[in-house]
Amino acid sequence: MADAALPDEVRPAPRTWSDDEEEALRLWIALARCYLSFSRVVSAKVADYGLTTAQFGVLEALHHVGPLSLGELADKLLVTGGNVTYVMDRLEGMGLVRRERSAEDRRVITAHLTAEGRTLVAEVFPDHAAFIRELASVLEPEECDELRRLLKKLGKSVAARS
């Protein structure tokens, strides 16, 4: 049955976009699918450590960068301030982090790892890094570098629009 003979509610819309737009749409779909697949697998692995991805991100950032304000954490993890507060509440309840109000600016709260938090990250990070390496192993090292460079270029361009 030809498309024209189909009822309107099941007939596909005619293509009204350019080949360049088609390429950009395909890129967006590939990026979204890749990110979703990657994040699902990584989230499941991080759950093996008894953490959520956001909790692991906070612990990892504090471990590798040192104490950070909650605002800096939100920027690094690409989440809202409210999300960081929620995650910090949970991590603090687990005894893995502590918050400290700045003496210079009482509005600023800095996150610190506790000894228990530092021990946990030191124990699980090597396994996490190896797991990420394994996921990326389908790409040659040069391909990883090129993909990272291209994604960074695209991300900066998109960010500049907002």
Image: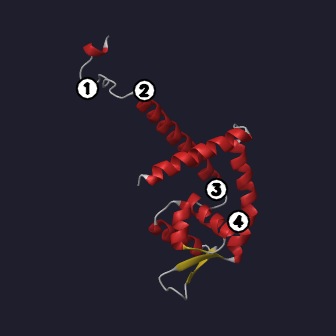
Sequence-wise first label, 1 or 2: 1
Residue situated in front as seen by the camera: 10 or 110: 110
**Where's residue 135, x and y in %?**
68, 43
Sequence-wise first label, 3 or 4: 3
Sequence-wise first label, 3 or 2: 2
Q: Secondary structure at mark 2?
A: helix
Q: Nearer the viewer, mark 3 or mark 2?
A: 2
Above or below, 37 against 115 in this view is above
Residue positioned 65% across, 64% down in the render? 60
Q: Residues within 10 Å of mark 2 (few under 14, many from 20)?
A: few
Q: State the CA–CA distance, disc 1 to disc 3.
A: 44 Å
Q: In this orientation, does residue 140 appear?
A: yes
Q: Residues within 10 Å of mark 3 (few under 14, many from 20)?
A: many
* Amino acid carrying mark 3 in the image: Val
Q: Which residue is mark 4?
A: 121
Sequence-wise first label, 1 or 4: 1
Q: Nearer the viewer, mark 1 or mark 2?
A: 2
Q: Secondary structure at mark 3?
A: helix
The numbered dot on residue 46 is: 3
The answer to which quarter of the image holds residue 90 is bottom right
The numbered dot on residue 19 is: 2
**Where's residue 38, x and y in %?**
59, 45
Q: Can you name the residue that lies furthest to the top here?
A: 1
Considering the image in quadrants, where does the N terminus appear?
top left
Q: In this orientation, does residue 40 appear?
A: no
Residue positioned 24% across, 20% down in the render? 7
Task: Assess whether mark 4 and mark 2 are in contact (beta carbons under 8 angstroms).
Answer: no
* Amino acid carrying mark 1 in the image: Glu
